[in-house]
Image: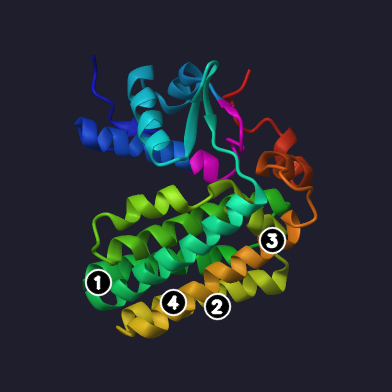
Amino acid sequence: MQKFKSVNGAQTADGGRNEGSAIRGAIQARITDGRIRPGERIVEQRLAEDLGTSRTPVREALTAMMALGQVTRTRSGWETVDHTPEELRDAFRLRASLESFAAFNAALEATEEQQQAVREAYDRMHVASGRSYSDALERAQVMASLNRRFHQQVAIASNNTRLPGVMDAVVVAPLVFSAFSWYTEAQLERSDYLHGAICDAICNRDPHRAEWLMAEHILEGWEVVERNVEPAADGQRSADLWHRLQPTAASDGANNNSK
């Protein structure tokens, strides 16, 4: 069988490890920007066609994501993992600890090239935050994707080889997407300021400031989410919340994975 070389135009080297990483990244991106929603069924064949590959590497990527708690296997196939508000709270608290640790280490350990990658990721987010968008959905999709890139670069810059994977397992990607559609202009400006300050602290090798700013940033993000999920009934899951609070995204048919 021909080896997989790209995911929607993103070039990868031949080989199972690079292929699997690229496919997992592409699936996670679809979760991050709302094309695959919480609790939604994932059809392997349709996803494989969308990514331009066969079902086998898609199945392997989903299996790896299941080990990280991002998807689950049911009798009818695969589904993205859903969460109660309590589970979301716990995830954000854990994320604050992990990402502040990543920022602390990045300020100490990052190479000049890694510092530059963090800076470039922030610059792209900063430019995007000042753009005009057709609606909240478009803004959320763009900002969630760039946000994921920034936090990934911080994790990589920590030079802790286990940390990026652990952080991917903790981040509740659909809620990060939703949070950007809930942000007011003032909150978006605040988020941009904190990203810039975190970047500066890492590049200035100020680990304690980087750690504190990252924790503050993640917990402020949780406050935005909490205000939207708190009114829900006990036990209501994030899929219900997502559909209730994001009707435009939920009805636009952006993803092709459910029958």
Indicate the secondary structure of the residue bearing disc 1.
loop
Mark earlier in primary sequence (4, 2):
2
Q: Is residue 103 left or right of residue 234?
A: left
Q: Amino acid at mark 1?
A: Ala
Q: Residues within 10 Å of mark 4 (few under 14, many from 20)?
A: many
Q: Identify the residue under disc 3.
A: 226
Q: Identify the residue under disc 2.
A: 193
Q: Amino acid at mark 3?
A: Glu
In the picture, the quarter occupied by the N terminus is top left
Mark earlier in primary sequence (3, 2):
2
On screen, 245 above or below 239? below
Q: Which mark is residue 110?
A: 1
Q: Residue at x 28, y 30 (%)?
A: 5
Q: Residues within 10 Å of mark 3 (few under 14, many from 20)?
A: some
Q: Identify the residue under disc 4.
A: 198
Q: Residue at x 60, y 58 (%)?
A: 89
Is label 3 in contact with label 2 (beta carbons under 8 Å)?
A: no
Alpha carbons under labels 1 and 3: distance apart = 33 Å
State which region is magenta: 29-41
Alpha carbons under labels 4 and 3: distance apart = 23 Å
Is label 1 in contact with label 2 (beta carbons under 8 Å)?
A: no
Mark earlier in primary sequence (4, 3):
4
Q: Residue at x 49, y 53 (%)?
A: 171
